[in-house]
Amino acid sequence: MRGTQYAIGALRRQIAKLLKVKEGARNATLNKTAFVIGQLVGAGMLDQQDAVAALEDAGQRIGLGPGEVRRSVASGLRAGARCPRGGGR
């Protein structure tokens, strides 16, 4: 995994929370998680491909379909990257 130690840790913590979410909140939580991670990607603190792979894997592990996962991850990452966290590129 490529990125700062902080960003990699944040990704791991966000994934751990996502894996505990209950049915009914899964898609919204995946999108919110992707937004948070997208902020780190947008700041150049985390590799986008690594983030996508981790988020899509987690989304499927919580029972969402592949298409739904791809759309939620792409949407959340895109929105988050438009609002990068401090740290810049």
Image: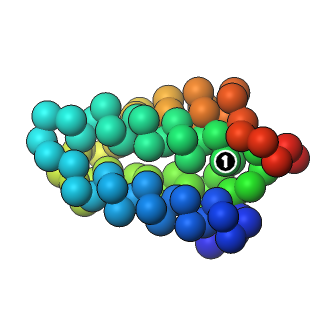
Q: Residue 83 in the image: x percent, y percent?
A: 69, 29
| Secondary structure found at label 1 | helix
Which of the two residues, 86 or 1, is positioned nearer the viewer here?
Answer: 86
Give whichever of 80, 67 is nearer the camera.
Answer: 80
Number of numbered labels in the structure image? 1
Residue 51: x percent and y percent? 56, 55
Answer with the quarter of the image where residue 80 lies. top right
Q: Is residue 67 visible?
A: no
Where 79 falls versus 69 (above or below)?
A: above
Task: Give the residue at the far right of this rendering.
Answer: 89
State the image coordinates of residue 66 (x, y, percent, origin top left): 30, 46
* Residue at point 31%, 32% (across, down): 28
Horizontal placement of 18 versus 86: left or right? left
Up/down of 34 relative to 47, above or below? above
**Rendered image coloring scheme:** rainbow
Q: Amino acid at mark 1?
A: Leu
Q: Residue at x 85, y 44 (%)?
A: 88
Residue receiving disc 1:
40
With respect to residue 68, does 66 lie above or below? Answer: below
36 left or right of 26? right
Compared across the picture, whether 64 is left or right of 36 comes to: left
Q: Residues within 10 Å of mark 1 (few under 14, many from 20)?
A: many
Please say if 1 is above or below 30: below
Residue at the (71%, 65%) spot, across then down? 3
Where the N terminus falls, by quadrant? bottom right
- Please state the horizontal and vertical placement of residue 30, each as a whole percent of the image: 36, 41
Q: Is residue 20 visible?
A: yes
Quadrant in the picture for residue 67: top left
